[in-house]
Image (cartoon, coloured by chain):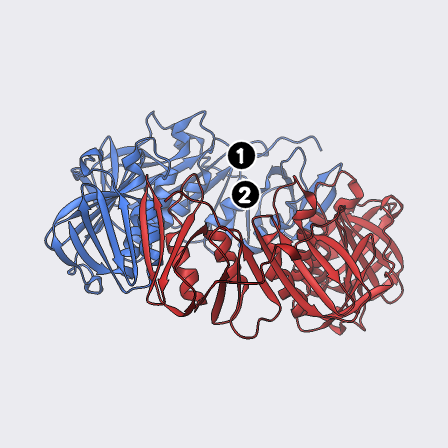
Chain colours: A blue, B red
């Protein structure tokens, strides 16, 4: 193996592949990036137990790459050393060559490194075959779907399936749902695809979102074992979470008795201002609506003190309401919406309430459970 | 106590005072900022055991402050709540008023907060009197003096006095010295002041540097108990470290047998590139100089591999040299210098060597102990 290429372009792709590499993997070779050099292309692979990333580099993919393969071959190099060497080289070009067994030479400018690699045969074989069930989705839409839901996943490992986002297709609609059982976030998209029902770890979805963040079309492929998201050159695949995802549709109320429309950013800022007042380390905020001209948000703690905010609604439909909730759940929900004004729909003071965009709902629904208080 | 003032200007000064406040102080009132309101000024005080900051705010000091005192008085408010409230208010102006005992009302826009404060009588009395021994120094010079030395202080508490920077005046010269006993940094300035010899905690010096970072003249005042640095409105005072500071002058070699002049940034980058190769978690770099055209920097580890850098010197005076050192000590030392080219002066391969600016030395000297290796 012996090749030269543009240092800066190479580094850009190494950074992407390295996102899947866990530097302290119990499998030593998985601390590395696998490089497979063919006559006109290099395939980079990085993986941990959960997520794998593969990129195929060639001059056809990126002419600034200036790839020049002198000899084909493959090697696995510890990702920390590989990124550190390539990043810090003073030269425009880097040459990488196996000189003896797994000893690999890096050369650029006046600097030379010889690094002990891992044998490619020690690198786990990863099945990158594309599942039959797949559909096409714009990268921005995929990214927004994750952004609008992933914050509501659970961070506790007591019910592992709740740490992921549930993705369900009924043939024409993709529904993404996340819940930690205190709040729920849901986002729908029209798709054309066979039926499926999978739950993807939130960490994997965040990585996918960070890598594909432009306006291109992505293929999303699903099997009972994995999720794959890819464009022509970059493929990311994630394991799935096992266990049935709870039926959440029946939790979402359909009939409402109190509906408030309010400016989204005013509402977020008012909650944010009073969030420092905590009782037992929780921010419990009380919303009292008498009529459109008498809406207050209060937060009291025996120890710290209290906050009072007067809110101005845009419309209110219903009898007076007095409800309490966890401040940051409602703030997260309001932040995941995107219209200037939002609609908050309540049934009773002890039932979940929902937050939606006013007007065009864009398939987003945010649900929060109220908190019982003894005021 | 009742006053109004510009939210943004007030917040700017609260941030400075809060640097001295430890949010988990065992003395509850020290978690707060003390505000003393007189008819035309507010004095803010923050303190922990090590450092105290006092700022006197008035319209004369900053006309954008728009201070309007309705009633004088004083209170102590938890600094986290105080900063959070003032930062997040939507209004241009904030009004602060004691309404009952220590219950303090904050008002701005449509938001109102009532916070339980601490009694000013519970706030420790801090002696801000100015010591007789003092001199004037430009804030930029003070800042550079700290920057050029503080990194060489010890982070271990085994010899507490080494965690600070030693400041000595002989009447005409201020000498700042820091050492962790493996390397030493020294910076001199001409001053006019009585003799003193104090050691100041590095954390205090870093805070002083972060607060006074412009071109103004500062007064630096010294007693056997404290260091004070102040301008017309802001005063910072730090406790001193107890215990005699070691005599370091005799450690600095005066006669040299090998002197290399080299481009500073080339040298730093070459060390930086090979620093990822560690043996027992240390980066030991070997410098071999045969003559001006044969200078190499190498770093080898059985496990990881090796690096080789060819360096180009600007001049070399001496017989061939083969010396090893801790990479980041030499990198820190070279970074603390500021000339384009630096002079590295060696005596023998087991004696400390020094790094200085080429030409105008600006009173900076950096010393590093070599490492014994068995190549």
- Depth check: give the residue in front, A151 or B49: B49
Tag count in the figure? 2
Q: How crowded is mark 1: few (under 14 residues within 10 Å), some or many (20 or more)?
A: many
B230 on left or right of B91: right
Nearest to N terminus: mark 2 or mark 1: 2
Can residue B89 be seen here? The reply is no
Q: Which residue is drawn at 54% across and 46% down?
A: A331
Q: On the same chain: label 2 and label 1?
A: yes
Provide the chain ID for the residue under circle 2: A
Q: How far apart are marks 2 and 1 (CA)?
A: 9 Å
Residue A330's tag is 2
Taking depth in this image into account, of B256 and A41 the one nearest to the observer is B256
Residue A173 is left or right of residue A150, and the answer is: left
In the picture, measured across the screen, residue A136 lies left or right of residue B332, that is: left
A304 up-or-down from A233: above or below: above
Q: Where is residue B374 in the image (x, y as percent from the top left)?
A: 39, 42
- The numbered disc on residue A344 is none
Helix, strand or loop at label 1? It is loop
Quarter occupied by the C terminus of chain A: top right
SS label for mark 2: helix
Residue A233 placement (x, y as % from top left): 20, 52
* CB-based contact (under 8 Å), mark 2 and mark 1: no
Q: Can residue A185 be seen in this view?
A: yes
Which dot marks residue A369?
Answer: 1
**Quarter assignment of residue A29:** top left
Please state the chain letter of the residue tagged with numbered disc 1 in the rendered image: A
Query: Which residue is drawn at the image coordinates 82% and 60% (left, top)?
Result: B43
In the image shown, does B32 or B89 lie closer to the viewer?
A: B32
Pick the front one: B248 or A364: B248
Determine the image quadrant of residue A127. top left
Report crowding for label 2: few under 14, some 14 to 19, many 20 or more residues within 10 A (C-alpha): many
């Amino acid at each position: 193996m012996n090749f030269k290429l543009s240092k800066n372009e190479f580094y850009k792709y190494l950074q992407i592949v390295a996102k899947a590499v866990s530097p302290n993997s119990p499998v030593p070779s998985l601390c590395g990036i696998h490089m497979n050099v063919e006559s006109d292309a290099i395939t980079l692979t990085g993986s941990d137990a959960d997520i794998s990333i593969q990129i195929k580099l060639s001059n056809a993919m990126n002419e600034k790459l200036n790839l020049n393969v002198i000899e084909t071959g493959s090697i696995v190099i510890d990702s920390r050393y590989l990124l550190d060497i390539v990043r810090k080289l003073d030269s425009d070009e880097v040459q990488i060559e196996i000189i003896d067994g797994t000893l690999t030479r890096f050369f650029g400018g006046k600097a030379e490194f010889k690094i002990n690699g891992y044998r490619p045969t020690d690198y786990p074989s990863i099945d990158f075959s594309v599942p039959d069930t797949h559909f096409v989705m714009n990268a921005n839409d995929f990214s927004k779907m994750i952004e609008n839901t992933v914050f509501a996943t659970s961070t506790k490992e007591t019910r592992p399936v709740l740490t992921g986002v549930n993705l369900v297709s009924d043939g024409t609609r993709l529904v993404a749902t996340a819940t930690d059982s205190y709040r729920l976030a849901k986002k729908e998209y029209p798709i054309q695809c066979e039926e499926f029902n999978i739950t993807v770890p939130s960490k994997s979805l965040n990585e996918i979102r960070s890598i594909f963040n432009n306006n291109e079309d992505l293929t999303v492929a699903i099997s009972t074992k994995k999720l794959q998201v890819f464009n022509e050159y970059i493929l990311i695949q994630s394991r799935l979470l096992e266990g049935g995802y709870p039926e959440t549709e029946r939790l979402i109320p359909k009939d409402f008795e109190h509906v408030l429309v309010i400016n989204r950013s005013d509402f977020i800022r008012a909650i944010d201002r009073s969030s420092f007042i905590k009782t037992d380390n929780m921010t419990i905020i009380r919303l009292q609506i008498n009529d459109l001209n008498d809406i207050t948000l209060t937060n009291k703690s025996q120890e710290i003190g209290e906050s009072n905010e007067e809110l101005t609604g845009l419309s209110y439909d219903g009898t007076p309401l007095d409800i309490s909730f966890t401040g940051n759940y409602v703030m997260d929900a309001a932040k995941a919406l995107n219209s200037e004004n939002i609609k908050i729909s309540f049934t009773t003071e002890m039932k979940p309430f929902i937050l939606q965009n006013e007007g065009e709902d864009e398939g987003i629904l945010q649900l929060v459970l109220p908190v019982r208080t003894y005021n």
